[in-house]
Amino acid sequence: MNNSQKIKSKAGNLLRQFKGSSYIFGLNTIEKAGCLAQKLGIRSVLSVSSSAWAKDFKAALLKSLLERNIDILETIDSARPNSPVEDVYYLKEVIEKIRPDFVIAAGGGSTIDCAKAAAFLAALSPSVNDIEPYFGTGLVTRQIKNSGKKPYPLFAVQMSASSSAHLTKYSNVTDLKTKQKKLIVDDAIVPPVCLFDYSVTTSMGSELTIDGVLDGISHLIEVYYGADYEKNPENYKRIEDVALTGLKLLVDNLPKVLKKSNDLKIRELIGLGTDLGGYAIMLGGTNGAHLASFSLTDILSHGRACGIMNPYWTVFFAPAIRRQLLKLIDVFSGYLDKGEDIDKIRGGNKIPDKISDLPSRRLGEIAGGAMRNFLKSAKVPDTLAKVHGFKVEHIERAISNAKNPQLEMKLKNMPVSLNAGLIDKYMKPVLKAAEAGDFSIIKNLS
């Protein structure tokens, strides 16, 4: 068994440990959709893309559902990018009218996030279109306990390798008027069954593929940064195993898939990598890059926003993530800055562990620099200033929104503990550094 086969086998085993029989994944698995759907009932509402690119997949999905006598009572188009709140309310109203046994969401992260929110709103807040009380952590579960009602079950059918929304307890919803994304975090909204046929991702263009890989990398890196070896070594090792396996799959295979977009073997590896990102965010939480990305929705896709921000948060977090950085420099070793050959950093054959003598800040800059070079290799901007439409107002918006109690979980997930009172002093320089591409602007919290 070669290295590629070994890491593929390991990734598959990790996902099976995570989800068991509730999740079907792999190549050409769409024919099993009907079997999974049967676990939830026979009457459903379906949200799926009406776009030409999804035509064949949609037909295969419907064929499998009909073979198992699943009755599609109404079909609506999938949600727009970033799950606008208006799309959530529209699907909620359809669910209220039809009262199905369950809901099927077939699409990318936005479609599934939209359906997660609509499914619980239809049950917990009928006839009331107000999602604000649910932003934050555990507030859906609280309302379930208070009301005795349960959300409509959701069958999540993923169609793009990116957010892992089909696997997780997260729902991102955006207010298009304020251009701000907010987050619902709750175990009660995890889809009870899900499916991902990795072969469908060949219909993704290169830009969407890049977005998905960057989103998956961000999930893995941010959760890895938040893991604490001293407090919980067993959980740290579990997270590290998932993170490093997923990162190797994604970092190694993005250049390959951009050259061979229809190669199913490569698409499978990327699907496994982004799914491990979903596993990671169920073991821990995202933090700095995701927090900043929520204020950049009008100029950047989610994956790109996180990808641009992560190198700069890496430098800020460096003193607290020394152990992780030593591993990550290996993962991104093919993208080190010129003159920073990994063997030279280590001291060649004389002192193999020389890298461990470097200051933490320097390790952060080396890893952050390699991440920026990875972005450049995919023709993604490595600074905010290079992003079309970026304005200073985006930084001000991000600073303001970081102080919102509804996003407090992102601060708590950070390996360097921040609170609202420290945002201006420490988060603002990270954002300014991301604007200028200058690590020296970043101030480490002593």
Image: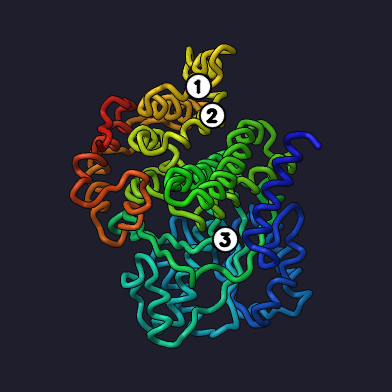
Q: Amino acid at mark 2?
A: Phe
Residue bearing the label numbered 1: 336
Residue bearing the label numbered 2: 332
The residue lying toward the viewer, choosing from 31 and 19, is 19
Q: Earlier in the sequence, mark 1 or mark 3?
A: 3
413 over 128 or under it: above or below: above
Task: Write the residue at 69% across / 51% down.
Answer: 198
Question: Is there a contact, CB below 8 Å, between mark 1 and mark 2?
Answer: yes
Q: Is residue 440 visible?
A: yes
The secondary structure type at the circle numbered 2 is: loop
Residue 261, given in percent of the width and then of the height, sits at: 67, 38
Q: Amino acid at mark 3?
A: Leu
Residue 305, given in percent of the width and then of the height, sits at: 41, 42
Residue bearing the label numbered 3: 167
44 over 224 or under it: above or below: below
Task: Write the residue at 38% across / 52% down.
Answer: 413
Number of residues whose C-alpha sits closer than 10 Å to that of mark 2, classed few (under 14), some (14–19) or many (20 or more) = many
The secondary structure type at the circle numbered 3 is: helix
Mark 1–mark 2 distance (CA, rounded to whole Å): 7 Å
Q: Is residue 445 left or right of residue 302?
A: left
Q: Amino acid at mark 1?
A: Leu
355 over 430 or under it: above or below: above
